[in-house]
Image (cartoon, rainbow, N blue to C red):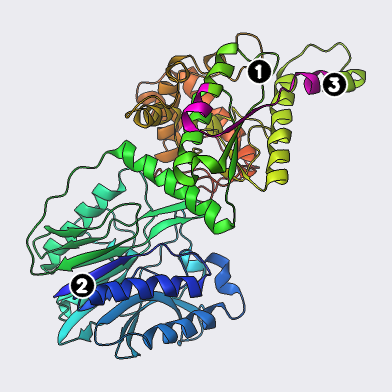
Amino acid sequence: MKLGLAQVNTTVGDSAGNLALIRTAYERGVAVGAELVVAPELAITGYPPRDLLLKSGFIEGNLAALIELAQSVGEVGLVVGHVGINERQPGRPAVNAVSLLQHGKVAATRTKTLLPTYDVFDEDRYFEPATDNAPVIFNGRQLGLTICEDVWNDDAFWSDPRYRANPVDGLVEQGAEVIVNVSASPWNLGKEGMRREMLASLATKAQRPVVYCNAVGGNDELVFDGGSLALNAQGEVLAAGAQFAEALVEVDLDGSVRSVAEPDEMALLHDALVLGVRDYLGKCGFRSAVIGLSGGIDSAVTAALAVRALGAENVRGISMPSPYSSQGSLDDSEALAANLGIQYDVIGIHAGFEMMKASLEPIFGDRPEDVTEENMQARLRGLILMAASNKFGSLVLTTGNKSELAVGYCTLYGDMCGGLAVISDVPKTKVFELARLINRAGEIIPEATITKPPSAELRPDQKDEDSLPPYEVLDAILERYVVESQSAAEIVAGGFDEATVQRVVRLIDLNEYKRRQAAPGLKVTSKAFGVGRRIPVAQRYKG
């Protein structure tokens, strides 16, 4: 049996555009001799549609699109994800569905059983789960149609399954010969290897081939990597799709086994961020970006990613020196802009800073300068960037990393101003690794930017380590506290200095209010600040 797995980059709510992508992929599948073409989960609506599902006409419109799509399908079958109507009431009005289309009609429809409601997922808010699932007959074969999470609960792989049911077991018991999974599985560091191991375990246990078709593209904070897979009944890889690129993956279930190279995690992180930037701007209607260039590594990496995503002609860098900016930082910013080939402007904030201090003198009096004046400089820069955004119709890309955002080493309405926080889920230590990756083929980011001690340059001789632990220590604590949800006591027991741990934990907890007001950020780790981490702002828990 030959299949085509359609890794398509859909846009949420764009049924007409999504249909065009699916049709093109289907026609390519027909042309290469596929018997069946498979498209991802909720491909007609895009994933995740979230509260668009509550809008009048949204579900009906996607069903009309499904019928229209079916009318263009002939002998070659098409499996596609969409929103269905829950026919069993009471219950939620919608179901997460997958249909087999053939001979101009919807031949069969099945519904998702396991609805993820954790991290970034909230499907139980919208969908009614299936209570059963039977194989679908296609050209004399029994196919087990499953949707994303339905293959993520096998107790042979997971020591602590989230759900009582394992839909694949039921399909195999009913005679399914092939397990087909349509998916919209967002990427994070390390996920591609774990996903392949999980699907291999599933195929081996079921003694059935497993075909997995995943979405690709960025939708808001989430980045989908594609990486579609086909495995034989022994869990060996028959075909693997490219990551972070649209593709039609050709699969021969009777074909030979292929080897899969171990991925370069930093290269994947780079590609995920590039795709996330390109799709966020493109799907929101922006063509260009503006970035504040400080001479530091964060703004340099963000600018390099933006150029890869949008092209140098669509990126503007603005250097905004203050009285405390070093000549080295100014030189590094100019060199970076020249290396990238982007528009570069210098707009000093010294005069504005002095004017603001004079304006506030009547109420500040003789109080000494402190963090207030530091934040004033950051907010003047935010004003300049937002003015450029308004004047030129460009989106401001913020440049703060996950480590800074965690402990509040950032300024509301200052360096946090912007429409997309590109590296807000990238710890500082990995920002350095990204910089090295970007420079592999030649120096783009000036070497001095990478090697000099990080500094906000908002007061004389300032260094980040004046206020924070070394980033290697900070990031290790952050991983344990935010990602692994360890308590302060557990982190200390792991060998960290108690005073340092207590200070970092306190800063993380105190700065939830800042993160609540931050620009949306691209999720690239297993636990990001934002939509997937729901910590109350007004709370007193000490853990």
Pointer 3: what residue? 355
Q: Is residue 513 left or right of residue 149?
A: right
Between marks 3 and 1, how big is the CA–CA gap?
17 Å
Does residue 315 lie above or below 442 as drawn?
Answer: below
325 and 223: which is toward the camera: 325
Name which residue lies at 16% across and 57% down: 200
Mark 2 or 3, nearer chain start: 2
Image quarter where the N terminus lies is bottom left
Graded by Cα atoms within 10 Å as few (under 14), some (14 to 19) or many (20 or more), the crowding at tag 1 reads many
Evaluate whether residue 96 shows in this view: no
Give how far apart the Cα atoms at labels 1 and 2 are: 60 Å
The residue wearing badge 1 is 458
SS state under label 3: helix
Extreme residue toward the top, this view: 461
The location of residue 198, given as percent across then percent down, is 22, 55
State the extent of the magenta-drawn residues as a range.
Answer: 335-354
